[in-house]
Amino acid sequence: MALVSATVVSAQSGNGWTNLFDGKTLNGWKKISGEAEYKVEEGAIVGITVPNTPNTFLVTEKEYGDFVLELEVKIEDTTSNSGIQFRSHYDPEMSNGRGGKGRVYGYQFELDPSSRRWTGGIYDEARRDWLYPLSLNPAGQNAFKTGEYNKVRVECIGNNIRTWVNDKAAAYVIDTVDKSGFIALQVHAINKGDLAGKKIYWRNIRIKTGDLKPASFAKGVYVANYIPNNLSAYEKSDGWKLLFDGKTTNGWVGAYKKTFPEKGWAIKDGTLNVQSAAGGESTNGGDIVTKDQFSAFDLSFDFKLTPGANSGVKYFVTLSENNAGSAIGLEYQVLDDTLHPDAKLGRNGNRTLASLYDLIKADKQKRFIRQPGQWNTGRVVVYPNNHVVHYLNGVKVVEYDRGSPAFRELVAQSKYKVWKNFGEAPKGHILIQDHGNEVSFRSIKIKELK
């Protein structure tokens, strides 16, 4: 059973704002899940780290649905990772990761003073992991200042979750999982004794739950939209377009064809599926390409592998080679690294998931790889100056400059050396590969960059 009330609060005071902390006591809050210390010092709630205890949370006794939350936060140094939970919950039966039971789960505003600089990102505590690593918004990564108070703003209106750090736009998530829950202040678990006694400070905590109007948000911030095949008004105004509408093959044709393949591809439940054909490359329906061509762009797509599957998303595909097999282009590799033999071919792992196929290995951590049967999000950004970045689930894994001497040297060592000026076309189609394995795609969207 929950330790907090399930009442969704709508009371307001003082221009619609309600103070959640009176500056003197912890009235209205409860400590759960761990044994870190919370106390009040000089008008601030102070959280103090304690070794060998799970993440500890000071939670509100009430729950909140739509709201705007503002507060100030200070972290003493770069060793004290923390967070602010919102629309969150407590499960007394869930493992706490340290041999006991009882755990907080739900959305978390990340407080990360480390060199990673992900403060303002959104984490799904004890559930889905990262929803918005702040690497998705590099312009927001330097807003947080260690050793001084920082202004935090969290805005939850309907499915839209947006964050700010010192009035600078940080993260934007669109999600439907939680409509309400408590707010909590986290003291993160520590394993080393020399990290004991570190302090995190929170003050001027206030919330507004009525007459909510979205604040202005900087243009050009990537949105992690977890509603399949959906574009928000913000994304549309920022230049994003869906390349797959979830229902039809509009905008796509077979590579080297004038129409969409009659077999080998299927649309079901909002997904575009490559059908299995014994692992043959372009031997069933064949690759598909966009009718339109693109030069500088931000491309995002969700994909789900079956065990042992192989596919790819290619860009700058010109269809000028008229080659047999899969059409030629720069490729974001889509692969089950564990079971497919291609992961062990090429050079130094440059045919693994999210790599620039046969050229550059993706530098990825295991925690950011979602296994077959789960949805991953791939992203390719090609800037107007030909700088290119691959992301996997929000984290940068490949970076290179198209057409540079270093790029051409890699091409000369690859299977692509037989193609003149490979990967350097001024524009090209986007391609999804039929490699004879079942792979699903959805939420394929693109923004042209200028």
Image (spheres, rainbow, N blue to C red):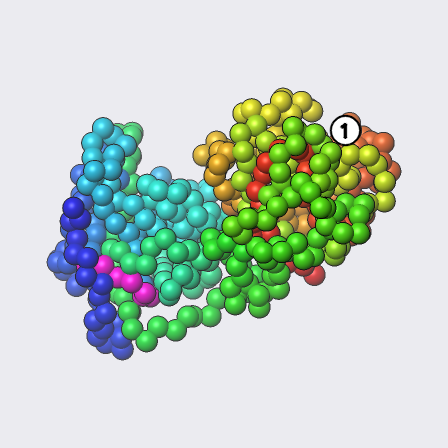
Magenta segment main secondary structure: loop
Does residue 148 appear to the left or right of 347 in the view shown?
Answer: left
Going by the picture, which residue comes out furthest to the front? 262
Query: Measured from the top left, where is residue 258 in percent x and y?
Result: 80, 52
In this view, the residue in front, 294 or 13, is: 294
In the rendered image, is residue 333 in sight? Answer: no
Query: Measured from the top left, where is residue 168 in percent x and y?
Result: 46, 61
Counting every numbered tag in the picture gives: 1
What residue appears at the point 84 percent right and 36 percent down from the top-left corner? Answer: 323
Does residue 9 appear to the left or right of 27 in the view shown?
Answer: right
Would you name the residue on which mark 1 appears?
Answer: 414
Query: Measured from the top left, where is residue 319 in percent x and y?
Result: 82, 45
Query: Measured from the top left, where is residue 185 in percent x and y?
Result: 26, 51
Q: Which image quadrant is residue 239 in? A: bottom right
Does residue 158 appear to the left or right of 437 in the view shown?
Answer: left
What residue appears at the point 39 percent right and 47 percent down from the top-left corner? Answer: 123
**SS at badge 1:** loop
Going by the picture, which residue comes out furthest to the bottom? 15
Amino acid under label 1?
Ser
In the rendered image, is residue 59 in sight? Answer: yes
Bounds of the magenta segment: 61-68
What residue appears at the point 54 percent right and 61 percent down from the top-left corner? Answer: 231
In this view, the residue in front, 375 or 187, is: 375
Q: Is residue 13 above or below residue 345?
A: below
Q: Is residue 300 above or below residue 363?
A: below
The C terminus lies in quadrant:
bottom right
What residue appears at the point 22 percent right and 63 percent down from the top-left corner? Answer: 8
Does residue 165 appear to the left or right of 413 in the view shown?
Answer: left
Mark 1 Cα-neighbour bin, 10 Å: few <14, some 14–19, many ≥20:
some
Q: Which image quadrant is residue 345 in? A: top right
